[in-house]
Image: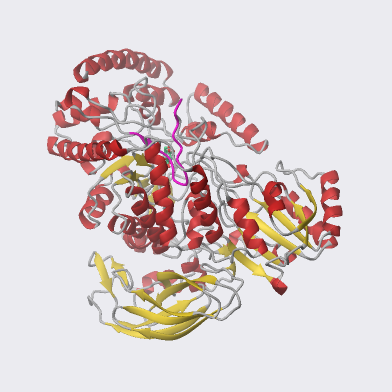
């Protein structure tokens, strides 16, 4: 390959494809989102879910499936996804997403598995195994520390090394080591001052050298900042379509000695290996897939992932022939997936209102009850109340609207629309037998939960969700899902409440390890429904714990009258710890199906993660010495069995001075002083404040600070359009993307129309030097066109 061919190979040729080189017999490969269904765009491509894609099965999203705690199910979903991808000519499936749910407000939480890295990693690894078994590569994303949507492409996540390792990387480690992921997507953000895609510590030292990753790193769409530094750090493919500007940048970097030709060769080799393997894999490709069979998989997946949060007086399952009222717009137009790049065009959709006739229930009436727009409507409310008054049981379908959670924006609160709550309160006046069916991709505040006798949390359960819900309501299926995230009482209780989302250049992860239950548990903050919680229609008893060096075993008995599955969780704690740590941490789990009356011995093996912590002094995983408590729980707060095991220390070097980090030792981390955070970081806190000058890496929304009147005018126009769309309840994803996108992305996503030189001109212009900027843009335009033509002739 010539240097030009090598350089051009390392960036995309369009929205979804890599470049082919006919002369060399190198084909092009096709990437598609994911992750809960295939979003292959046959026509115009975009990465925001705007243009239509080919019909594919819309499975429940990751936030939902994580509630199944079922790796076999994850693998089966992966296989089904892999089969659909292959049948549509997709070689790399851009998922699963496994960023940690640092705050319930992150707009993409519906796409992520958990607040816990172990559970997220295990589920991700299972998807990866399934997808890759079909000859398609999975692409776990977004590596790493990408837990905020606001200014997601221009945000620096600042955190200490231990938190990075234990919370934000462990899931990826499992996906790579156990799932053998062959591609990884590097995140938009910086991590401790270096873009994730240029971060050698992340991409080479940790990913390749420590985790043993032997695949390719693909940038998130527009995440490349300095392509040459990316290549040197271990990133293979810049996506989507920077034209040939990036290739030129790479050649110039080799010529100037900024990076070495060996780095380029290594990345080309790795990419070639992937492209040729994927090409060969696709030779057996079969067109089409069994739509009905995959719909059934989606249905079973939804059933296994539904969480029963409460069930007073055993109101569920419904009695055969029960008179029910169906209330709520979601029963007619289900909320079953999220918005943005993961948006799937389903093969079909079932709704509760259409299929309820298949069940042994008497429907006394149905009403949409409330409007999706949020407005109160007296007439529909009255209709709903009249129907509710006639029923034995009211089934109320409600939750978060489509516009509340989306890629590209974070929520500003955790509430559901007030008009739904208003209706609920009135329904409670006419019928006390209320059963709530929630659809929401993330944790919500539930100050209204006492209105319900029973509550089912369905998350976003895919195209076959309605059937799954009805079979659980009627008892055809026994719920077995458990929460993969905590439902706090109120947003103010959440650990990152004071730090999230950051509006400055830096996002300070001051809460450190104390994410989700790790915080609530340690700081003793009461929550509404704890991590790992979920009810069943049967009862499980735990007995006979036995701990050995290899793991823990116990007996699980289905002591109730129905068959069912139980998720048992292994938590580990070190009460005598000298190194601060959460009160307990999840280190294993098992899901076991038992017939009524059946009992089984369950074993959960220990692994390399059971006792380890990251020691920032030795710079290694170490084990602290002491007597560990091994706990088996039905949830994180419902520990049924426990026993001790002694472990010897692997080092006597203690990483911290207790007095200097007292907040972290107490776990009460909602307010961490600068001094203490600085001590934890081991370096000064970087200055995240804005300065007067904007740069290529500042987001468009920072035009607010622009010196140029024209630029501020553009900002005001953009903001007005955004506000108008927001106020209509339909956030404009295009505008949101532009708003949060840095100037440099104009060069990275326009297929060669804009070069980095021209971006430099734009930045000069917005900084108030209009004519100088304009001059640079115009000269840059002509230079770019000329250089593009010259380069194209060299790679033909
Ligand atoms: C998202 C990725 C997605 C990519 C391609 C980006 O904006 O962050 O998750 O895979 O677009 O659509």
Question: Can residue 491 be seen in this snapshot?
Answer: yes
Query: What are the residue bounds of the magenta stretch?
Result: 30-43
Task: Give the x, y percent position of residue 706.
Answer: 48, 29
Residue located at (36% from left, 50% from top): 144
157 with respect to 9 (left or right)? right
Task: Give the x, y percent position of residue 645.
Answer: 33, 84
Quadrant of residue 793 within the rendered picture = top left
Front in this rendered view, residue 655 or 783:
783
Front in this rendered view, residue 244 or 126:
126
Task: Give the x, y percent position of residue 114.
Answer: 47, 59
In the displayed structure, 616 sits above or below 646; it is above
Task: Give the x, y percent position of residue 41.
Answer: 45, 31
96 with respect to 727 (left or right)? left
Where ligand 1 lies, by image quadrant? top left
In the displayed structure, 682 sits above or below 651; it is above
Front in this rendered view, residue 575 or 173:
173
Quadrant of residue 385 within the rendered picture = bottom right
Quarter of the image that includes the N terminus: top left
């Amino acid at each position: 390959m010539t240097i030009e061919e090598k350089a051009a190979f390392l960036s995309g040729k369009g929205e979804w494809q890599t470049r082919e080189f006919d002369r060399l017999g190198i084909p092009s490969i096709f990437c598609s989102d994911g992750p809960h269904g295939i979003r292959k765009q046959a026509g115009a491509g975009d990465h925001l879910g705007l243009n239509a894609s080919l019909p594919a099965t819309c499975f429940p999203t990751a936030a939902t499936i994580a509630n199944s705690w079922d790796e076999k199910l994850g693998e089966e979903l992966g296989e089904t996804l892999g089969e659909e991808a292959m049948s549509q000519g997709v070689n790399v499936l851009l998922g699963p997403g496994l960023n940690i749910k640092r705050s319930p407000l992150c707009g993409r939480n519906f796409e992520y598995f958990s607040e816990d890295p172990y559970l997220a990693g295990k589920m991700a690894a299972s998807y990866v195994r399934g997808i890759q078994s079909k000859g398609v590569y999975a692409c776990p994303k977004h590596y790493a520390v990408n837990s905020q949507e606001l200014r997601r492409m221009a945000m620096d996540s600042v955190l200490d090394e231990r938190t990075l390792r234990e919370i934000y990387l462990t899931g990826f480690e499992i996906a790579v080591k156990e799932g053998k992921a062959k591609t990884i997507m590097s995140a938009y953000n910086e991590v401790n001052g270096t873009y994730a895609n240029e971060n050698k510590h992340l991409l080479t030292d940790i990913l390749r050298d420590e985790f043993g990753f032997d695949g390719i790193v693909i940038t998130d769409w527009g995440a490349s900042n300095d392509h040459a530094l990316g290549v040197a750090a271990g990133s293979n493919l810049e996506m989507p379509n920077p034209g040939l500007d990036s290739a030129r940048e790479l050649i110039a970097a080799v010529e100037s000695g900024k990076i070495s030709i060996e780095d380029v060769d290594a990345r080309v080799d790795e990419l070639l290996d992937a492209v040729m393997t994927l090409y060969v894999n696709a030779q057996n490709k079969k067109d089409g897939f069994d739509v009905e069979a995959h719909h059934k998989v989606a249905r079973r997946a939804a059933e296994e992932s539904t969480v029963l949060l409460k069930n007073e007086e055993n109101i569920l399952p419904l009695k055969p022939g029960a008179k029910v009222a169906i209330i709520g717009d979601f029963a007619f137009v289900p909320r079953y997936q999220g918005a943005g790049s993961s948006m799937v065009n389903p093969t079909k959709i079932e709704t509760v209102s259409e299929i309820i006739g298949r069940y042994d229930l008497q429907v006394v009436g149905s009403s949409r009850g409330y409007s999706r727009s949020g407005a109160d409507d007296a007439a529909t409310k009255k209709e709903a109340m009249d129907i509710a008054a006639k029923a034995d049981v009211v089934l109320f379908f409600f939750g978060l609207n489509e516009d509340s959670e989306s890629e590209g924006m974070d929520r500003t609160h955790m509430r559901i629309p007030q008009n739904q709550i208003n209706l609920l309160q009135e329904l409670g006046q006419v019928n006390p037998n209320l059963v709530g069916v929630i659809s929401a991709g993330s944790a919500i505040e539930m100050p209204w939960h006492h209105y319900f006798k029973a509550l089912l949390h369905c998350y976003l359960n895919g195209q076959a969700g309605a059937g799954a819900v009805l079979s659980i309501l009627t008892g055809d299926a026994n719920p077995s899902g458990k929460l993969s995230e905590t439902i706090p009482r109120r947003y103010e209780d959440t650990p990152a409440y004071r730090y999230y989302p950051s509006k400055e250049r830096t996002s300070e992860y001051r809460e450190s390890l104390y994410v989700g239950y790790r915080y609530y548990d340690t700081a003793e903050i009461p929550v509404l429904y704890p991590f790992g919680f979920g009810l069943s229609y049967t009862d499980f008893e735990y007995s006979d714990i036995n701990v050995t060096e290899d793991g823990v075993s116990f007996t699980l008995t289905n002591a109730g009258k129905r068959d069912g599955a139980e998720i048992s969780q292994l938590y580990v704690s070190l009460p005598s710890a000298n190194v601060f740590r959460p009160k307990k941490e999840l280190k294993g789990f098992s899901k076991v199906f038992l017939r009524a009356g059946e009992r089984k011995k369950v074993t959960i093996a220990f692994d390399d993660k059971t006792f380890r912590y990251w020691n920032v002094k030795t710079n290694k995983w170490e084990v602290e010495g002491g007597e560990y408590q091994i706990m088996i729980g039905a949830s994180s707060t419902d520990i049924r069995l426990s026993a001790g095991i002694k472990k010897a220390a692997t080092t006597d070097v203690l990483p911290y001075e207790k007095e200097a980090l007292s907040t972290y030792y107490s776990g009460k981390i909602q307010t961490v002083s600068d001094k203490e955070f600085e001590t934890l970081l081991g370096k000064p806190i970087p200055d995240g404040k804005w300065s007067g000058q904007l740069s290529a890496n500042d987001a468009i929304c920072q035009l607010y600070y622009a010196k140029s009147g024209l630029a501020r005018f553009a900002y005001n126009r953009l903001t007005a359009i955004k506000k108008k769309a927001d106020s209509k309840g339909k956030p404009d994803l295009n505008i949101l993307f532009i708003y949060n996108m840095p100037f440099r992305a104009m060069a990275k996503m326009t297929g060669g129309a804009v070069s980095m030189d021209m971006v430099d001109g734009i930045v000069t212009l917005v900084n108030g030097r209009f004519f100088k900027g304009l001059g640079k843009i115009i000269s840059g335009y002509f230079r770019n066109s000329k250089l593009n033509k010259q380069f194209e002739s060299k790679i033909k």
